[in-house]
Image: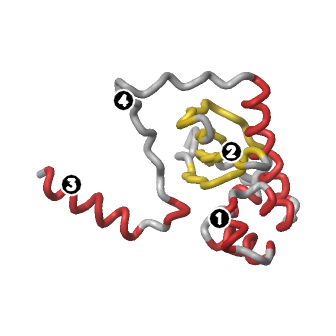
Amino acid sequence: MSRWFGVALALALLVTPVSAQSVAPSMPSAEAPAMKVPDAAAIAEWQGVVHSQVQAFRDHDAEAALSYAAAPFHEQFKDPADFLVAILNAGYAPIMDSRSESFGPYEVMSADVVDQDVTFVGKDQSLYEAVYRLQREAGGWRVEAVTMVKKADVGA
């Protein structure tokens, strides 16, 4: 049975778009040094980046939205309008159309990488859960990836 699970997992990883892949947290080894607990200022900084990018998406401000993205996005998208179209085509319209976002738990993956849970409320009151992977670059925290799913309807 484990053989088929491995085959199914490999196929799922091959057909899943890179931008939509879920990133499983890595388990620290016994020899790994303990992660430093971020202070309130660091948390506010990366959450501010997420909020600012989300607001830029809501405003359809492609240049501002791209400015909060990690370096590989800047290499791939020379025209911010192309970045905005790619985000829409990748299924992230619920973020652009969201009415609000709230921050949940976070996980420090390394000194320069954090996963931040965010819940979005859609214009139709649908709920979406997202995990933002942020990378600290020379210019500060930047969004490296987002994984998002629609939550099951509540009270239906």
User: CB under 8 Å between callouts 2 and 4?
Assistant: no
Mark 3 or mark 2: which comes first in sequence?
A: 3
Q: Which residue is mark 1?
A: 72
User: CB under 8 Å between callouts 1 and 4?
Assistant: no
Q: Which residue is mark 4?
A: 29
Identified by mark 2, the residue type is: Arg
Q: Which is closer to the viewer, label 3 or label 2?
A: 2
* Residue drawn at x 66%, y 41% as measured from the top left: 119
* Residue drawn at x 75%, y 70% as measured from the top left: 84
| Element under disc 2 | strand
Q: Is residue 76 depicted above or below 31 in this figure?
A: below
Residue 90, quarter of the rendered image? bottom right
Residue 129, quarter of the rendered image? top right
Distance (Cα) linking label 1 and label 4 = 29 Å
Quick one: quadrant of the C terminus? Answer: top right
Can you give x and y, in whole percent of width and height, for residue 110 in the image? 55, 36
Crowding around mark 3 (Cα neighbors within 10 Å: few <14, some 14 to 19, many 20+) is few
Q: Which is closer to the viewer, label 1 or label 3?
A: 1
Mark 2 or mark 4: which comes first in sequence?
A: 4
Mark 2 or mark 1: which comes first in sequence?
A: 1
**On the rendered structure, is 55 left or right of 147?**
right
Distance (Cα) linking label 3 and label 2 = 35 Å
* Residue drawn at x 73%, y 30% as measured from the top left: 43
Can you give x and y, in whole percent of width and height, for residue 9 in the image? 29, 58
Disc number at residue 136?
2
Crowding around mark 4 (Cα neighbors within 10 Å: few <14, some 14 to 19, many 20+) is few
Q: Which residue is mark 3?
A: 5
Mark 1 or mark 3: which comes first in sequence?
A: 3
Distance (Cα) linking label 1 and label 3 = 32 Å
Q: Is residue 117 depicted above or below 41 in this figure?
A: below
Distance (Cα) linking label 2 and label 1 = 13 Å
